[in-house]
Amino acid sequence: MSLAALLFPTIIHCLTLMGLKKIAIFTLLAIGACTIAAQRTTIASERIKTVRLVVDGNASRPPILIKGSNSTIEVSFDDLTHEYERYVYRIEHCNFNFQPSEELFESDYLISAGNEEVIDDYEPSLNTTVLYNHYTFTIPNSNMQPLLSGNYRLQILKEDDNGELSPVVTTFFYIVEPLVSISTQMTTNTEIDWDGSHQQLEMRVQTQQLPQGNIADEIKTIILQNRRWDNAIRSPKPTSVMGSELLWQHSRDLIFKAGNEYRKFEMQSTHVAGMRLDYLRWYPPFYHAAIMPDKPRRNYLYDEDLSGRYIVSTVEGTDNDTESDYILTHFTLYSEQIPGYDVYLNGHWTYDQFVPDYRLDYNFEEGAYEGTVLIKQGYYNYQYLAVPHGQNYGGETGPFEGNYFQAENEYIVLVYYRRPGERYDRLVGTSLFYFRP
């Protein structure tokens, strides 16, 4: 890769939805994958970076609010310019499949004078080589208050050349009304192997507080591993129903590939190379950081991680949001090329997107996958995923990270409920837990 290519990378955010397969047996799989892909955070402007949703100041929490609580979500992002841009945001209630709840009126789910609010809280970056404005707003606020439980789509919009508002960011948050009790247990004694490469979820959902009809058909669930949507499990059928209790036991539908601990690096300074940085140098107009070259992992390696999360921080300022610089960060993975697969960086900071920004190209001379990403200073978790060419779901940890039952993983369970005749899907329960064998 030439130095010019490193200095002037094209940073394009896009969402590629996979078309339906012509072969009938794959049709349902394709539909399900597209639905899940639609939930991911997407960025449609090369200038927008570091989109974050933080609940009550705790960056480790998922963007879930309890209905009726005083909690708030702070939404923030950087625009790579010091020129003010007029951004507005819009909120829309969505169903279980993250499509707009067409049977609801806006007044049903939102208290708002109008479903577009200007983002007027912003600060320019200070003492950074890459100039940016840092925009923030909170939900709920005096102008925008969601009313119902469920999934919410949040769009940040900017006026385009035709005078129309078009989204530059699409993301999601959730409001839960806790009406069910969720009990979970993970095991490495799975229906596939015993203390091998998988982890299996067993789950009980107590529904006494819900009207008791055909409850097994009225409840839907989503299970996430490390908040990844590309391998999310949707609506596995209960293995048994005992009155108001739904059980999932010995269900092959609830088996996850275990993966490995996340890799990590730290770059909080532009003067001193941090953890796992090979070098840190200034090549105008950017600082460049090279992560120490990686290789495929052939065994489980315990290393305390954040299950894919990241923390924005700098030691050379007092405000992490506005004084952290952006650094061109270089990744190298020495490995034979895998035919039929693309290789992507993955972590919460990639928004679970399999797009050109995070794809690694193969350098035949070096015998390595290589990629460069413009990243804000901080502490980062990452892993390498192999994705079948042309797909935007089903990333495989096996080829480069391995799958080992000992891996510590975060799991989130989302439980939805909708009776016949109701107009929207309610989020009636959530559970977050860490599996540590």
Image (cartoon, grey):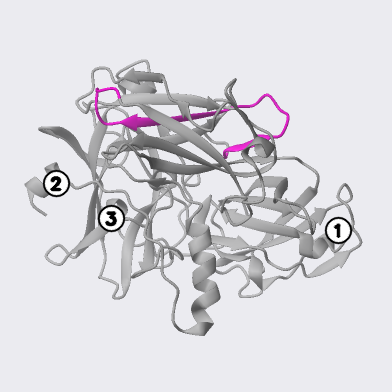
As displayed, is residue 130 above or below residue 103? above
Q: Is residue 421 left or right of residue 78?
A: right
- CA distance separating discs 2 and 1: 56 Å
Residue at mark 3: 356
> Which of disc 1 and disc 2 is earlier in sequence?
2
Q: Position of residue 335 (x, y in %)?
A: 26, 65
Q: Which kind of residue does numbered mark 2 sit on?
A: Leu
> Which of disc 3 and disc 1 is earlier in sequence?
1
Along the line of sight, which residue is nearer the eye, 388 or 335? 388
Along the line of sight, which residue is nearer the eye, 42 or 264? 42
Magenta stretch, residue numbers? 62-84
Residue at mark 2: 6
Q: Which kind of residue does numbered mark 1 sit on?
A: Glu
Q: Position of residue 164 (x, y in %)?
A: 35, 39
Q: Is residue 346 magenta?
A: no
Crowding around mark 1 (Cα neighbors within 10 Å: few <14, some 14 to 19, many 20+) is: some
Give the quarter of the figure containing the N terminus: bottom left
Q: Is residue 217 left or right of residue 383?
A: right
Q: Which mark is residue 314?
A: none
Q: Which kind of residue does numbered mark 3 sit on?
A: Pro
Residue at mark 1: 245
Q: Is residue 162 left or right of residue 186?
A: left
